[in-house]
Amino acid sequence: MAAGMALAVSAEVPADRLVAYSARIAGDDARTRIVLDFDRAPTIETRYIANPDRIIVDLPATAFAFAEEDLKATGLFSDIRYGSMDATSARLVLTAARPARLAIAKVMPNETGGGYRLVLDAELVPAQDFAALVSGQGWSEPKQASTASVPVAVSASDEFVIAIDAGHGGIDTGAAGVATKTPEKDITLAFAKTLHEKLKNQPGVRAVMTRDTDKFLSLSERVLIARQKGADLLISLHADTLRQADIRGATVYTISDKASDHMAAQLAERENFSDTIGGVELPTETEPEVGDILLDLTRRETQAFSIAMAQAVVGSFEGQISLINNPHRHAGFRVLQAPDVPSILLELGFLSNKEDEKLLLDPAWRERVAGLLVEAIKRYREPQLANGG
C-alpha cells in the first residue's frame, strides 16, 4: 500500500524531486523519534544552531506529500518546519523545546513495500553539550557581509533602480488565506511580478527582484541583493494575518527602533521570524555602533526618504483601495535595515480577512494596485527629478 502511494504521488511531481510520502513522530521530553518515508534514498546533512536551539536536516529537492498533522511538533520539539529552499534543495527545521542532539540520523531501505526511510532519533542533552555541538561542527551557514560594509553597485546610467522583494518563499510559506489556504509566499511573488512588468514601461527606471521563483532567502540576503544591484529604493511585499478577522486594508511600514503600536510590533516579530523558520544562523550580537558621522547622516537621510516614500504610497492609495487606520506605521523590520537604501514594507492586505483574501487573489486587483504603486513611485521621485537627482 505504501509503495502504491509513493508511486501515485511521484507521478504528480517533477522526476528529479524525491517524494516524502509519509511521516510519523513519537516520543516524550527525553527522547523523540521522527521517521519519513521516501520513494528513493535521500542524502542528508545535519547541523545544530543556537538561539533558538534547532536541529537542521538538509535534503535534496523534495516534495513533502504527507499531511501536516502527521509531523506535528511533540516531545522534544516545540516547532517543526519543512519545505524547499530552492530548486535543488529542501530542509527540515526542528526547533527544540530543550537542548537535544540526534543520537541516530540514518537512511535505510524499507523492509516491506520498497522505498527508503529516514530515521531521526533525538535525545535530551545538557545545555553545555548542545553548545559544544554548535561550536564544534565543521559546517556553518555562509556568513552574510555586514549591510554597512557591502560595496554598493553603481549604475553606469542615471537609472533609478527599484528592488522588489517578494516576502517569504521556499520553506518559509508565510501566512495562509483564511478561506483558500493560499500561502503568502505565492501572493507576494505574483504581485511582485505584476509590479515588475508595470515598472518595465517607466522611463529612467529599472526594476530588479530579490526572488523570482519559490526559493528561501534570509532577511540579510534580501538586503544584500538590493544593495549589490545598486537599489535606490526597496519595496518589500507582504500579506499577513491578524487575530482580528475584521481588520482589513493596506499598511505601509518604515523601520524604527521603537514600534509605533502593538500591532506593528507583533507583525515585525513575525516577519523577523522568517530566518528562524528557514534554519538560518542568527547573529549572536548586534552590530557595533560605528562612530562615523557620515554613516549616521546617511542613515538619517535614508530614513527621511523612506518616510517620504511611505507617505507617497498612502497618498496614492487613499480613496482608491482600502487602508487600515493610521496606514503609515513603523517597527523594527530587519528587511528594512539597509543604511543607504530607502526601504518600505508594504502589507497589501490581510489574509485573515475574507474580503482582503479575495482581492489579493484577483489578478485585476493586483494590476490596479501595482499601477497605484507606480504612481506613488513617480510622486516620490518628483522632488529628486526637480533637483536633478
Image (cartoon, rainbow, N blue to C red):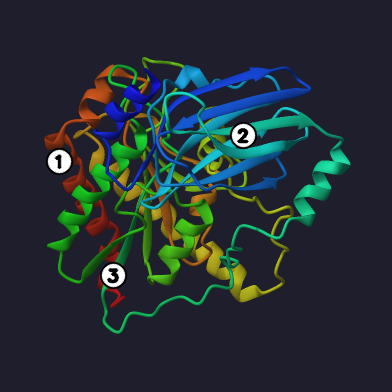
Indicate which label's residue lies in the foreground, 1 or 2. 2
Measured in 3D between alpha carbons, the distance from the residue under mark 1 to the one under mark 2, in whole angstroms, is 41 Å
Q: Which mark is residue 94?
A: 2
Quadrant placement of the C terminus: bottom left
Label 2 sits on a secondary structure element that is: strand
The CA distance from mark 1 to mark 3 is 22 Å
Q: Amino acid at mark 2?
A: Leu
- In the picture of the structure, the residue carrying the numbered disc 3 is 160
Which label's residue is closer to the chain start, 2 or 3? Answer: 2
Residue 132 in the figure: left or right of residue 267: right
The residue wearing badge 1 is 368
Dot 1 lies on which element? helix
Q: Dot 1, how many residues are within 10 Å of its Cα: few (below 14), some (14-19), or many (20+)?
A: some
Relative vertical location of residue 48 with respect to residue 352 in this rendering, above or below: below
* One can see residue 332 in this view: no
Residue 109 position, x and y percent, is: 51, 34
Residue 278 at x, y percent in the picture: 53, 43
- Look at label 3 and name its amino acid: Phe
- Please state, as top left, top right, bottom left or bottom right, where the N terminus lies in the image: top left
* The furthest residue to the bottom: 156
Mark 2 residue crowding within 10 angstroms, few (<14) / some (14–19) / many (20+): many
At horizontal 22% and vertical 32% (from top left) the residue drawn is: 321
Between 128 and 338, the one lying in front of the other is 128
